Image (cartoon, helix red, strand yellow):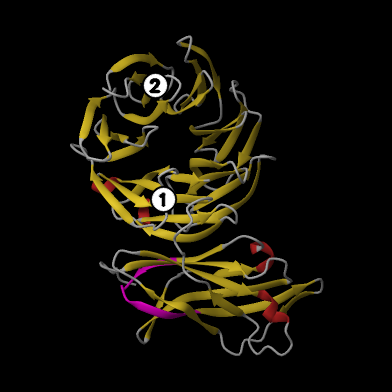
Amino acid sequence: MPPVPDGGRVSVFLNLERHEVPRVTATVAAVEILEGENWVPISEPAITLDSETIGKGQVFLGSRVITASRYERMRLVISDAGKVDGEGRHGLPLDRGEIEIKLPDPLELAPHASEVILLNWDVDAAFQAESTQPLVFRAGSFLVAGVASNKVYVSCPDIDTVYVVRADKNWVQGAIAVQGRPTYVVADATNKKLFVLASAEATIKVYDLVSLELSEEIRIPMTRDPIYMIMAPDYLSSFILDGMGNLVKVDVKSGQMLARMKVGRKPVFALYLGSQERLAVSSTLDRTLYFLDPETLDVMEKIVVSGTPNSLLEWENYLYIAETETSSVSLYDLNERKMVKSFPLGYSPSRFVSSGNNIYLTDEMDMSVTVMKGGQINANKVISVSGVTGEMVVAEYQRLLYVGTGECDGSLAIVDLTSNRLIGKVEVGAKPLGVVVIQ
């Protein structure tokens, strides 16, 4: 299918209408939407649906940029279906392999928009004797803005989309179109704002979390190729690292640059140290950790580490440092201003988060998450996930850890924080990068 320059993106997801159902499988050869008199494909490879596997989860069916227009109908092309019981699989008669679905409300797809269609599969229809169509799918209503809590926001730069995920069900519920490769996201829960770094445009885009509408665009002054963004604790200023080795501080109300400083050689990560009122920046090529004044960006202190410092985590009076090149983690005492210890850990330690007394560390090469006790740097448990691991976020209310996994399937792996076990995933169909939760 040729590119559609001024089109909008449509992503399709499927849930079960009822979770506790007998097992039915179906092969979806195509997902299509009706544009005028033509059926336009949304998915490419065939997808096998299995009600037992789906359970309370969700299946990603496809995503594509199509012509900006009004859409009222879609269809699933089914090549095979059957009921499964103790005696085996029993084929279901398909009077027609094309199952049309009327959208409850017309989809008005605007140019450069990103919309989500949610399908519900009525599995029970396959067991109704009088049913002429054993496979029944219904389209749900589109995301209604207004509730911002218990949501996970995950950016997918390759498709200019930030997906909205329900943390209570782990379902994609909606999408925000963000032009310019949305990478890192920060949420201000109090003021219901989502800050998105659009790296290709060197812009911070601010969205209202209630309406999901774009409220502000802040062009980052004197900056090219921004690679990382954090916010000050009051959300009034932003700190951005760029590909030229600069750290830029921007007033998010006025858009003015407050300070700019070249930090080390190839800085890759920044962390605001609340207890110290300092900014910590990892610089890889000179293997140095810089501590800066967050007002002026002047260097207050610097320490050289044995490997290439990557991500950082503040835990009580300690600073955890992931050192990718030496495959190790170091522990720095912030009060005593000294390195406590360093320990080999995994193959490519990357990102930290903490929950309670536990610290979680992703390993890109090992495709895993390591669990450590706070104040320690030895592994208590290693959790394998599918795909190269990226950013993480904790949903404390649900006691869940979301881990971005890419290249293979494009999803968020879900880890139960009580048992420290992988319990599922949220499919998004593209490589995720930034992820943040509002509770």
Q: Residue at x 56, y 63 (%)?
A: 59
**Where is mark 1, residue-wise?**
155
Q: In the image, is 6 to the left or to the right of 368? A: left
Q: Residues within 10 Å of mark 2 (few under 14, many from 20)?
A: few
Which amino acid type corresponds to the residue marked 2 in the rendered image? Answer: Glu
Q: In the image, is 32 to the left or to the right of 97? A: left
Q: Which residues are magenta?
A: 63-75
| Residue 163, placed above or below residue 131 | above
Q: Foreground: 181 or 249?
A: 249
Q: Residue at x 65, y 61 (%)?
A: 56
Q: Quick one: quadrant of the N terminus? A: bottom left
Which amino acid type corresponds to the residue marked 1 in the rendered image? Answer: Ser
Q: Residue at x 31, y 35 (%)?
A: 238
| Residue 171, placed above or below residue 301 | below
Query: Looking at the picture, how far across and down is residue 423, in whole percent?
Result: 65, 49
Q: In the image, is 233 to the left or to the right of 364? A: left
Query: Looking at the picture, how far across and down is residue 134, in whole percent?
Result: 65, 83
- Reply yes or no: does residue 64 show up in magenta: yes
Q: Residues within 10 Å of mark 1 (few under 14, many from 20)?
A: many
Q: Main SS type for the magenta part?
A: strand
Q: Which of the 4 quarters of the picture holds residue 187?
A: top left
Query: Looking at the picture, how far across and down is residue 36, in whole percent?
Result: 35, 85
For the residue labelled by badge 1, is the local secondary structure a helix, a strand or a loop?
strand
- Determine whether label 2 and label 1 are within 8 Å by CB: no
- Please tell me whether mark 2 or mark 1 is closer to you in this view: 2
View extreme (left): residue: 222
Q: Which of the 4 quarters of the picture holds residue 375?
A: top right
Total marks shown come to 2
The label number, if any, that marks residue 277 in the structure image: 2
* First in sequence: mark 2 vs mark 1: 1
- The residues bearing labels 2 and 1 have C-alpha atoms spaced at a distance of 29 Å
